[in-house]
Image (cartoon, grey):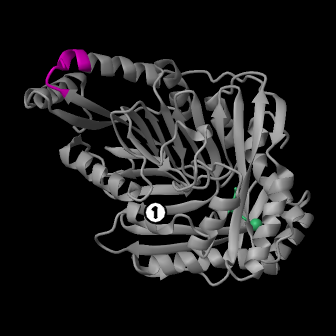
């Protein structure tokens, strides 16, 4: 019997509590299988707890994580050390924790969920003040849905002064609150004000980037812009997530709540997935709209697959990811030509990457090596980042950066946080960017970013 009963939970807590010295603490974690729970409802039910919520769904819809509250966190404000700090803190957490998890299911047991800012060296504004340079949370309560089976993990930080019976009762009450069937109200959100942040200046920056590229100081520079919306009411994140699920195929759906703010999106772009040392990454760059009829769609698809400008944008990403992965993987496989990745509002050029992770590396090493790929930064990395830092009129915050999860067995998955919005009560900022190369035309790049606003715009009261 690996599923714990109430009395066993109490005994487990008691054992940890009585083993502690005065100022010490211990993270106790246990996982059990539970009856089917709808992850969107679990997320919605947690609203009444007033704890921060995190939502993650993989693009194949086979895997969900919903994290509630914070039992422990790894936070870093410093740009140069954020990766190492996070790795060290993660190792400390794992070394000190007591883990009761009888399942070898990825994403159960102690899992850290979080993300980071795109460029911690860029001057920040107040827009993202609630989001750190790097922030990972080990939730108090976490629902894992893996191929239709549900698991609940409870993580408790206990101290000498805690009372096991009381704690076990609190946990029991919380479990029933969270697993209780909840109705997500279908409220109508409408936009009462929409402001594109300086579109003219943005097009001018695109032109300046093409000049730089022609001078050969860089090959590709990704430039992004912001749209600010005001609604008739507060946006309900649970409903937004459900609407994203219904409207955005082939996409990761994520939400990271921080008090009154929530960073939410439906991104098609995997950065890296690790499952039992098998590594998957993605090159995604080059964009065209979807056709209105199947015939028109297949013409556009054919053109995209043969379009020199888009193929160039794409190729920089393939070259970089290939070079980056060679040191970390064996059996690296990358097809020589891209295929189409279809989405609701647009289609991309896509090249999958697979390999076997060499021993001694973690998923965090891979993220550090890859971020930002030329899909979001440019090529070469340093030159394009300097251009973005100096010329882009936007605080990207967590937009365009890795978001995801990792477990104690070196499994995990990170996506690139695009097609996303920072929702702040009855307002939101949407972000969209595109890869500028030598043949980029500012007006066309502008239209491309308009298409990339659509996934979020359409679930926030705009037109699909
Ligand atoms: C930058 C974004 O998307 C990236 C840019 C693309 C392009 O320019 O063709 C395509 C996919 C993404 O790599 C975004 O959606 O904001
Ligand atoms: Mg493009």
Residue 344 appears left or right of 64: right
Looking at the image, residue 397 lies above or below residue 290:
above
Question: Which residue bears the numbered disc 1?
Answer: 367
Looking at the image, residue 36 lies above or below residue 319:
above
> Which residue is drawn at the image coordinates 78% and 24% (left, top)?
188
Residue 118 vs residue 356, the one in the foreground: 118
Q: Position of residue 168 (x, y in %)?
A: 25, 20
Q: Position of residue 344 (x, y in %)?
A: 77, 53
Magenta segment boundaries in residue numbering? 159-167
Using the rendered view, name the quadrant where residue 141 is placed.
top left
Looking at the image, residue 434 lies above or below residue 464:
below
> Which residue is drawn at the image coordinates 38% and 46% (left, top)?
112
> Which residue is drawn at the image coordinates 34% and 75% (left, top)?
358
Using the rendered view, name the quadrant where residue 192 is placed.
top right
Residue 16 appears left or right of 84: left
> Which residue is drawn at the image coordinates 46% and 69% (left, top)?
369
Q: Is residue 349 visible?
A: no
Q: Position of residue 251 (x, y in %)?
A: 64, 52
Residue 166 appears left or right of 410: left
User: Could you tell me which quadrant the N terminus lies in?
Assistant: top left
**What crowding class fits label 1: few (fewer than 14 Cα within 10 Å), some (14-19), or many (20 or more)?**
many
Q: Position of residue 48 (x, y in %)?
A: 50, 18
Q: Is residue 138 visible?
A: yes
Q: Secondary structure at mark 1?
A: helix
Using the rendered view, name the quadrant where residue 377 is placed.
bottom right
Looking at the image, residue 319 lies above or below residue 131:
below
Question: Which quadrant of the frame does ligand 2 lie within?
Answer: bottom right
Residue 435 appears left or right of 88: right
Q: Is residue 161 magenta?
A: yes
Q: Is residue 33 magenta?
A: no
């Amino acid at each position: 019997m690996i599923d714990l009963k109430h009395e066993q939970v109490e005994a487990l807590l008691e054992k940890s509590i009585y083993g502690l010295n005065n100022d010490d603490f211990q993270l106790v974690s246990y996982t059990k299988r539970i009856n089917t729970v709808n992850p969107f409802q679990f997320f919605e039910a947690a609203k009444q707890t007033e704890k921060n919520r995190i939502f993650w769904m993989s693009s194949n819809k086979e895997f969900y994580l919903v994290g509630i509250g914070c039992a422990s966190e790894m936070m870093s404000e410093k740009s140069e050390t954020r990766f190492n700090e996070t790795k060290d803190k993660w190792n400390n957490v794992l070394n000190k924790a007591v883990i009761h998890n009888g399942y070898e299911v990825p994403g159960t047991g102690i899992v850290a969920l979080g993300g980071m800012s795109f460029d911690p060296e860029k001057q920040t504004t107040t827009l993202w003040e609630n989001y750190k340079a790097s922030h990972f949370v080990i939730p108090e309560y976490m629902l894992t849905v893996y191929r239709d089976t549900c698991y609940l993990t409870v993580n408790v930080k206990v101290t000498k002064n805690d009372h096991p019976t009381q704690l076990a009762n609190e946990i029991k009450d919380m479990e029933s609150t969270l697993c209780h069937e909840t109705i997500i109200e279908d409220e109508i959100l409408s936009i009462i004000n929409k402001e594109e942040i300086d579109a003219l200046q943005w097009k001018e920056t695109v032109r300046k980037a093409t000049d730089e590229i022609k001078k050969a100081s860089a090959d590709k520079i990704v430039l992004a812009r912001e749209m600010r919306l005001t609604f008739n009411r507060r946006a309900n994140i649970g409903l937004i997530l459900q609407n994203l699920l219904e409207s955005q195929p082939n996409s990761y759906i994520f939400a990271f709540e921080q008090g009154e703010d929530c960073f939410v999106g439906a991104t098609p772009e995997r950065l890296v997935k690790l499952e039992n040392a098998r590594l998957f990454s993605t090159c995604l760059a080059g964009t065209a709209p979807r056709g209105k009829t199947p015939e028109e769609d297949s013409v556009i698809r054919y053109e995209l697959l043969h379009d020199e400008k888009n193929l160039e944008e794409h190729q920089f990403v393939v070259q970089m990811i290939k070079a980056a992965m060679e040191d970390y993987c064996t059996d690296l496989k990358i097809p020589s030509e891209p295929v189409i990745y279809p989405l609701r509002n647009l289609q991309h050029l896509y090249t999958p990457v697979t390999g076997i992770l060499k021993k001694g590396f973690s998923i965090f090493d891979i993220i550090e090596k890859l971020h930002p790929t030329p899909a979001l930064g440019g090529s070469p990395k340093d030159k394009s980042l300097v251009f973005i830092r100096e010329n882009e009129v936007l605080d990207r915050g967590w937009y365009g950066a890795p978001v995801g999860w990792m477990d104690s067995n070196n499994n995990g998955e990170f996506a690139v946080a695009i097609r996303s919005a920072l929702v702040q009560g009855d307002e939101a900022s949407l972000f969209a960017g595109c890869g500028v190369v030598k043949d980029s035309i500012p007006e066309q790049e502008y239209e491309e970013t308009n298409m990339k606003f659509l996934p979020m715009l359409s679930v926030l009261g705009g037109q699909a």
